[in-house]
Amino acid sequence: MPNSSSQKSLTVIIAVYNGVRNLEFIFAALARQSMNNFEVIIADDGSGPEIRKLIERAQPRLPFPVKHLWQADQGFRKNVMLNRSIEAAQTDYLAFIDGDCLPHRHFLKDHWDHREPNGLLCGRRVNLSKQMTDALSLMSITSGQFEKFSIGLLWDGMLARSSNLEDGLRLGNDIIRKLIPFNRARILGCNFSVEKKLLERINGFNEDYLAPGIGEDTDIAYRLNLIGAKFISLRYLAVLYHLFHPPTQVGGKNKELFDLTVALGDPVCRNGLRKIG
């Protein structure tokens, strides 16, 4: 994979829909990454003009290039934008996060250092409560304070407001990490990375999914498994903090679409990067 001053090594694809404050926080978290040879693509599923204005303001100060891809708001069409982002990526390796997730300082380094040929790297996430999310500030992001196990966060977890706090633990020793139980690789759409060519082999994301859930992760994982991709757990690495939002409803049709995919057993979707008749 290319790794020179003129060629970026990795593309970060961020799926967004509005959420200006969240994206501003994400830019601050990406600006302090220990790996700095990457590009960012904003996969924007119909946000208002505030997102564009933020990118225009932030870009001159950011140490990485940002490409903003946008489509009109016609309901949930996240997978369309993810496919457009795959096509637009200037690198061979892609890391995916959502526009409500903050990456740890070593997030991209962990994805990059642990990549393998034919591999699908699967990270986890800490779920922050509304109280912890509201308390965040740009200062807490740029200083790295948001990554620390504060008394406030631990207490919030004890109150069962924030959850999965154990997934905020980063263990650099692979031997110790692999000895910990419950470390099976399981994809989350907000924290995974993969070679671009693997997604091209399965024709990318299925654009028939028109509601959140299943289509951005479970469907992809199933079809990658059919072509023999190696699933690799990045639990206790590539730490990610998920900002609070009200629960989203998984579309009822999504399960029907996925059941059909399983019944067909075909890794290549018809309505993806290419439109196959």
Image: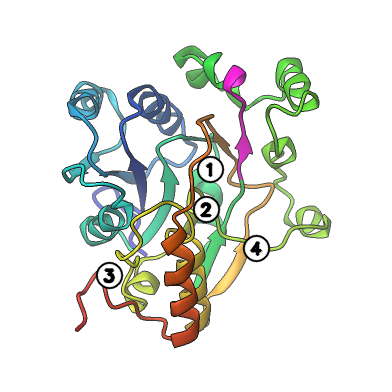
The residue nearer to you, when weighing 260 against 265, is: 260
In this picture, is 49 found above or below 79?
A: above
Q: Residues within 10 Å of mark 3 (few under 14, many from 20)?
A: many
Tell me if residue 265 can be seen: no
Please state which of the two labelled residues, at mark 3 or mark 2, is closer to the viewer: 3
CA distance for labels 2 and 4: 14 Å
Q: Secondary structure at mark 1?
A: helix
Q: Which mark is residue 185?
A: 4
- Residue 101: x and y, percent? 48, 36
Q: Which mark is residue 107?
A: 1
CA distance for labels 2 and 1: 7 Å
Mark 2 = which residue?
Answer: 111
- Residue 111: x and y, percent? 52, 53
First to last magenta residue range? 125-132
For the point 35% across and 45% down, the residue is 15
The residue nearer to you, when weighing 228 against 36, is: 228
- Residue 185: x and y, percent? 65, 63
